[in-house]
Image (tube, rainbow, N blue to C red):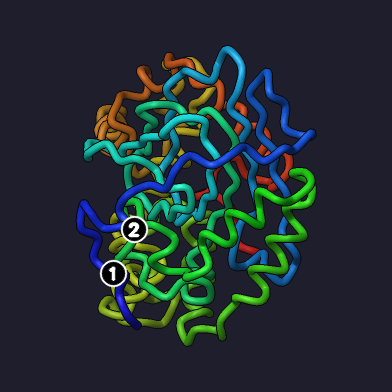
Amino acid sequence: MQPPRPLSPGSPLASPAAIRSLPPWPDVPRDQLSVDFFVAAPALRPFITGYNVYGVFGPDAGKRELYFPGWTTIRFSFPQSPWRVRYGRGAVETVMPAAVFGPSASDLETDSVLAGISVGFVVTPLGMARLLPVAADRLAGRLTPLGALWADADALLDQIAALPDAASLPGFLDAMLLARLGPPHRDAPLVAELARLLVDQHDIETPRICAHLGCSPATLRRLSRRHFGFAPKLLLRRSRFLKSLFAIIGQDQGRWAQLIDASYTDQSHFIRDCREFLNCTPGEFLRRERPMTMLSLKRRAEVLGAPLVALHPPPR
């Protein structure tokens, strides 16, 4: 397996392409924020979590947003001005029109909010080896031009822009991804079971996972990095934190200690994890106004069954 080409600051792949015209889709409002999610074809559901279309227009388009730690996302963007993001405490990067957002163990914050239309889908850990030619840990915590991995990235942008409406996207993307789907990876049964454990189980540690999967610690580390992007302990901590964060949303702070995962020694332990994964305290997170983030969580739960990518249960 070949790693992606290194990107120098002056290389064509490192420089975002010119701003592209907006797709003339009548089902994406031009006067307000909009988020639509679409279910993928059954044959693709183990490998992607569904499709999304963000329309960022209207008075809320200028607000800074935060996106949660998650899996790899492939995104095709048609912004009206350059769109910049930052992983955690890292450097600000300008998003390419066709980009791979690598798996993350930190928040992804917009420095200047995308005004325009963006189309994307999340590649699950089980889908990494079927759809992308690199290991997840080679993409983790950074942006990569999709053209470094798929030679037809620019052509896909043009084809998406030429669709008559957003409702045509699922059929187009289903056909494109089914044609691109590679053969099953030898790790697939272990990856699927580890993905299920991360969503379903609480207070689990790596020795118990190894015993459950019937693998050695070295094998667990290898498949965690190859397919998920991170070492097992970090995956478990991220999963525990996100479950706990969503348990306290809308709840009085006095109840947090009863709602967060029992493996947290105390509330300050949870707050430290929040600073690591979201670069803020839970209180700061809950007080900030993020209209697009909250709309996305709501719509994703309605259509795909889970508000957050990292908590999306794999198909059984």
Tell me the crowding category of disc 2: few under 14, some 14 to 19, or many 20 or more residues within 10 angstroms, Cα based: some
- The spot of residue 54 in percent (x, y) is 61, 36
Mark identifier at residue 13:
2
In front here: 122 or 269?
A: 122
- The spot of residue 273 in percent (x, y) is 28, 37
Cβ atoms at labels 1 and 2 below 8 Å apart: yes
Residue drawn at the location 22% of the way across and 53% of the way down: 10
Q: Looking at the image, can residue 193 be seen?
A: no
Question: In what element is the residue under mark 1?
Answer: loop
Q: Amino acid at mark 2?
A: Leu
Q: Amino acid at mark 1?
A: Arg
Residue drawn at the location 36% of the way across and 74% of the way down: 223
Tell me the crowding category of disc 1: few under 14, some 14 to 19, or many 20 or more residues within 10 angstroms, Cα based: few
Circle nearer the viewer, 1 or 2? 2
In the depicted structure, whether residue 90 falls above or below residue 286: below
Q: Residue 215 appears in which quarter of the rendering?
A: bottom left
In terms of sequence position, does the residue under pointer 1 or pointer 2 come before the other? 1
